[in-house]
């Protein structure tokens, strides 16, 4: 059916969210419409504030409202070990498992030449800069086990090898094509513990 223009506009905007089809978008829009004004205001303010207040940490490139982010700024975290992930949500998955005490580097994507994503399109330059600077002992490659994640890992291992740091890859042992974010805590913990040195 045809809704009033403001409702239609919200439904269209919501339908673009991952996993939200037009049906769910309509349900959400009607929910907002039926809720108290304060809720709609709070929702609008948090969406607006997100882009304003959250930027990338200049160290690990994660989304953060402080620079450096809380992990990079924490002296209890081992800055000499860098776990490289494709996405913010993978970092959240590893962090959620609780046992990792090193730092991270978020690439914001994987290499995908067929989709036009080359080394300059993701945060590889920044990773290289960190590894070339003194002190990094180990780089853990925790990109996914899908073809793009694998080729990104192989590319990084070759790129970082001349820096003389230890390069490891988290153990697979999980169904091919799985992403780090879909592993449960125990599987992720085993994958991290069973990481093997990469011979590039
Ligand atoms: Zn950081």
Image: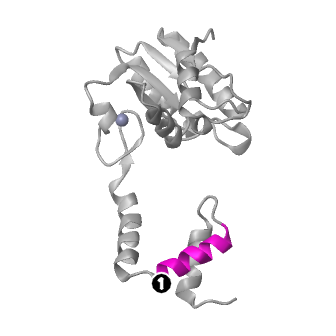
The residue depicted at 55 percent of the width and 28 percent of the height is 186
In which quarter of the view is residue 183 placed? Answer: top right
Circle 1 Cα neighbour tier, 10 Å, few/some/many (<14 / 14–19 / ≥20): few
The residue depicted at 30 percent of the width and 38 percent of the height is 70
Whether residue 24 is in magenta: the answer is yes
**Image quarter in which the C terminus is found:** top right
Report the image quarter containing ligand 1.
Answer: top left
Q: Which residue is mark 1?
A: 34
Depth check, front residue: 31 or 114: 31
Whether residue 197 is in magenta: the answer is no
Q: Is residue 133 above or below residue 120?
A: above
Whole-percent x and y of residue 89? 52, 42
The residue depicted at 44 percent of the width and 34 percent of the height is 95
Q: Is residue 135 above or below residue 53?
A: above
Whole-percent x and y of residue 76? 27, 24
In which quarter of the view is residue 180 placed? Answer: top right
Query: Magenta region: which residues?
Result: 21-33
Depth check, front residue: 36 or 20: 36
**Image quarter in which the N terminus is found:** bottom right
Q: Please, which colouring scheme is shown?
A: one colour
Q: Is residue 55 above or below residue 152?
A: below
| Secondary structure found at label 1 | helix
Q: Main secondary structure of the magenta part?
A: helix
Q: Is residue 131 above or below residue 164?
A: below
The residue depicted at 58 percent of the width and 38 percent of the height is 181
Whole-percent x and y of residue 78? 34, 20
In which quarter of the view is residue 5 placed? Answer: bottom right
Whole-percent x and y of residue 169? 58, 19
Task: Locate residue 10 relative to residue 116 in the image: left or right.
Answer: left
């Amino acid at each position: 059916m045809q809704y009033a223009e403001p409702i239609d506009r919200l439904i269209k905007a919501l339908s673009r969210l991952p996993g939200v089809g037009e049906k769910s978008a309509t349900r959400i829009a009607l929910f907002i419409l039926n809720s108290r004004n304060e809720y709609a205001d709070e929702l609008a303010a948090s969406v607006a504030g997100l882009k304003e207040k959250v930027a990338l940490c200049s160290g690990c490139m994660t989304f953060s409202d402080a620079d450096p982010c809380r992990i990079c700024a924490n002296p209890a975290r081992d800055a000499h070990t860098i776990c490289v992930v494709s996405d913010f949500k993978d970092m959240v998955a590893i962090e959620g498992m609780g046992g990792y005490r090193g730092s991270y580097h978020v690439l914001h994507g994987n290499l995908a030449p067929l989709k036009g994503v080359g080394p300059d399109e993701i945060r590889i330059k920044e990773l290289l800069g960190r590894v070339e600077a003194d002190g990094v002992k180990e780089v853990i490659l925790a990109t996914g086990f899908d073809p793009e994640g694998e080729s990104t890992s192989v590319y990084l291992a070759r790129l970082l090898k001349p820096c003389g740091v230890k390069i490891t890859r988290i153990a697979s042992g999980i169904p091919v094509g799985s992403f780090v974010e879909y592993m449960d805590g125990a599987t992720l913990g085993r994958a991290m513990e069973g990481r093997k040195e990469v011979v590039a």
